[in-house]
Image (spheres, helix red, strand yellow):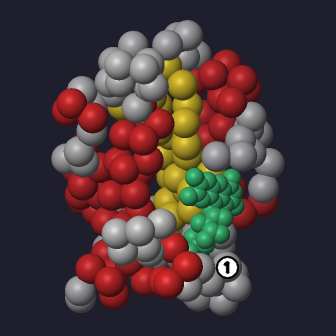
Amino acid sequence: MTFLELAKSRYSVRNYLPKPVEEEKLNYILECGRIAPSAANYQPWQINVVRDPDLKKKLEETYAREWLKQAAVILVFLGNHQQGWKRSDGKDHTDIDIAIMADHVTLAAAEQGLGTCWICNFDAAMCIRVLNLPDHIEPIAYLSLGYPAGSTDQVSRHLKRKPFEEIIKFDHV
Ligand SMILES: Cc1cc2nc3c(=O)[nH]c(=O)nc-3n(C[C@H](O)[C@H](O)[C@H](O)COP(=O)(O)O)c2cc1C
């Protein structure tokens, strides 16, 4: 499979089979996240793997969608703003680093036949309470993870992207 084929095969999965994710596959995709690049290689991140039914139930309340309950795992991407690289004008790169790491995970999961969906529209304050996070740790994104229940949930947005000519500018803007 080429990289383009892999990238095209990933889509936001919002419909999962009631099937656990094998430990080996989970560790593989987490390792793909771990080796992601980060600004100045500061690696200001942590992934909380939420599988425990009680904890998962509490976390699901931070993003009340029925489909999230179907996912075997919720990955919570935590950014450590004390560790993130800051440019001379103060711009904190933690969010960028986390996004790269999470993207590695979505693509690795797709390669393994697993589905993911990015979730940023969760109640962050509630997540902080559920996971008991300190002030400098921000829950930046969740990824639901599990086996996709068919491809019928591929929403029309998938691969509906702006045309190449509109977004790629060679030399002059
Ligand atoms: C940063 C980010 C945040 C997102 N947050 C959510 C979310 O909270 N809930 C959701 O259902 N989808 C969320 N998505 C999924 C997008 O809606 C989806 O990626 C986009 O519509 C393209 O569809 P595709 O992933 O199937 O290609 C998010 C995606 C990204 C990249």
Q: Residue at x 55, y 31 (%)?
A: 139
Task: Identify the image quadrant of the N terminus.
Answer: bottom left
Q: Position of residue 22 (x, y in %)?
A: 33, 62
Q: Is residue 99 left or right of residue 166?
A: left
| Residue farthest to the top, as pictured | 135
Residue 16 lies, with reference to residue 120, above or below; the image says below
Q: Is residue 147 left or right of residue 42?
A: right
Residue 28 can be seen, yes or no: yes
Residue 74 lies, with reference to residue 151, above or below; the image says above
Instruction: Please count the marks in the image.
Output: 1
Q: Is residue 47 left or right of residue 36?
A: right
Q: Quadrant of residue 29?
A: bottom left
Residue 130 lies, with reference to residue 108, above or below; the image says above
Crowd tier of the residue under label 1, counting other residues whose Cα lies within 10 Å: few below 14, some 14–19, many 20 or above: few
Q: Residue at x 41, y 68 (%)?
A: 172
Q: Position of residue 145 (x, y in %)?
A: 50, 60
User: Cβ of disc 1 within 8 Å of ligand 1?
Assistant: yes
| Residue farthest to the front, as pictured | 172
Q: Quadrant of residue 118?
A: bottom right
Q: Quadrant of residue 91?
A: top left
Q: Position of residue 111 (x, y in %)?
A: 31, 75
- Quadrant where ligand 1 appears: bottom right
Q: Residue at x 34, y 69 (%)?
A: 171
Residue 146 can be seen, yes or no: no
Q: Amino acid at mark 1?
A: Arg
Instruction: Say what secondary structure mark 1 lies in.
Output: loop
Q: Position of residue 16 (x, y in %)?
A: 60, 71
* Residue marked by disc 1: 157
User: Which residue is nearer to you in this view: 83 or 126?
Assistant: 83
